[in-house]
Image (spheres, grey):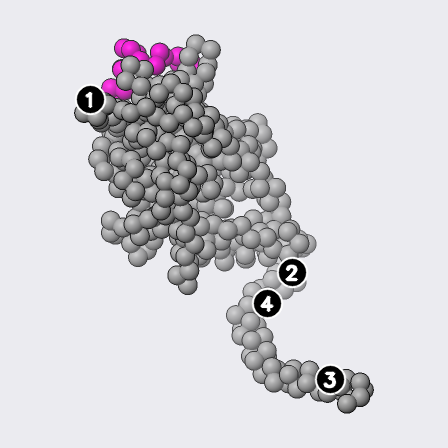
Amino acid sequence: MSKHSLTWIAIIVVITTMFLKLPPMVAKQDAVLRTYGALVEVDALARQKYVEPVLDDRLVHGAIRGMMMQLDPYSGYIAPNELPAFERRNDGEYIGIGVELGYRDGHLEVVAPIEESPAALAGILAGDTLLAIDGRDVEGYSVFDVEELLAGPPGSSVRLEVLHPGDAQAHEIDVIRGAVTMTTVRGFARDTEGNWIYLIDEQKGIGYIRISSFLGSTMREFDAVTAQLLRHDRSNLILDLRFNPGGIMKQAIAMVDRFIDGGSIVSTVNRRNAVHDYRARPRTPLANVGLVVLVNGATASAAEIVAGALQDHGRAKIIGQRTFGKGCVQHMIYLTEHAAAVSLTTAYYRLPNGRIIHRTPKNRDSDHWGVTPDREVYLSESEVRAIAERRREIDRRNVALSPSGPAADSEVYRDPQLRDALALLRQALATHPPTRAPSTAAR
């Protein structure tokens, strides 16, 4: 057959294929027009008839933002002017006030202020209900909408109206925006030179590490501290995840991997029930370390994964209160030419025993969300505030305590959850004296 004949045959095949596909294509276009025709019409009407000229894309941005709000409070639209600040946030430093937000029972809540942030220093508390920003009622706003309102230049002030847990009257608190720099691995106290002290009971050899959030540097800091403790044969540890709003999931998975030598750490499940399983590796530098984990209602997201996975593997005792219940997978998806993006909930995290941590409309009235402690120890509102105030003072370097002794014992006494964790480890040491911890350098 000649080359000319082959060319004509190819053209006929292409044309035939196009005609066969034409009805479905037309139907699809018609469905799109029916769905989004009103949106296009409103945009055109506003540009033609609104009392002031509409010269930018604010209507488009607003429409997309509204669409995302209909999905869940954690999905959102990131406009071009917001994108650089959003990308910097996970790097560990950004300009803002430093709060992690979530929804509980339909109300916008401060999951936890980031430690040492402007919000924490101004007196914003974990569990605060956020009512208004600069006089604007935020009821019905998404997390992304509120974060946009909280953004602003460094040194500028924003007024928050909040209702503290247990209070009947709302409070107005002025917060000065500034750099939020996050050192995520902290100790129990500081020495006179401001260095962190990671031994809470020097005589018994019990360490204490507080993780304020999970960022890119968290595991590097954590490995350095645990390597130091292991060099001194410290084989028992209290891991404090209270008021930890989460962060980078890979860092949380890596932390669990330090303590277990195999099996699933966490998996993700999407709308098609497709599962991606994150599994532990056999090399376990902290295998012989006795472990108690502290959690509360402000322990969220990545921090819940750590507590829940360690609990499911029987690797740690969990003490405190039921966690927040935020375990959704957010994917940042760039739009055309990376000019804007959406953060979209694409899956839920599932713990090794099959629990989905996220509090959904299907499970919110059950016990099948969050992490329930092995030993529940409740804190009063005054105790929560005392702990938060002590942390603020230590973070400001206004308090220096010896690692053990009357001052430290007094602080432990005022924290029932920490007191129970210490008692549990001391009892275990009395019953089963520790073997020497491995001297393997941390990964």
Earlier sequence position, callout 3 versus callout 1: 3
Where disc 1 sits, the SS reads helix
Viewer-nearest of discs 1 and 4: 1
Where disc 4 sits, the SS reads helix
Quadrant in which residue 381 is drawn? top left
Spatial separation of the CA atoms under disc 3 and disc 1 = 86 Å
Earlier sequence position, callout 2 versus callout 4: 4
Q: Amino acid at mark 3?
A: Ile
Does residue 395 sit above or below 33 in this rendering?
Answer: above
Q: Which residue is mark 4?
A: 41
Q: Amino acid at mark 2?
A: Arg
Viewer-nearest of discs 2 and 1: 1
Earlier sequence position, callout 3 versus callout 2: 3
> Pointer 2: residues within 10 angstroms few (<14), some, or many (20+)?
some
Earlier sequence position, callout 4 versus callout 3: 3
User: Are dots 2 and 4 in contact, CB under 8 Å?
Assistant: no
Viewer-nearest of discs 3 and 2: 3
Question: Is residue 207 visible from the viewing direction of this image?
Answer: yes
Earlier sequence position, callout 1 versus callout 4: 4
User: Are dots 1 and 4 in contact, CB under 8 Å?
Assistant: no
Spatial separation of the CA atoms under disc 3 and disc 2 = 44 Å
Earlier sequence position, callout 2 versus callout 1: 2
Q: Which residue is mark 2?
A: 47
Q: Which residue is mark 1?
A: 430
User: Foreground: 373 or 198?
Assistant: 198
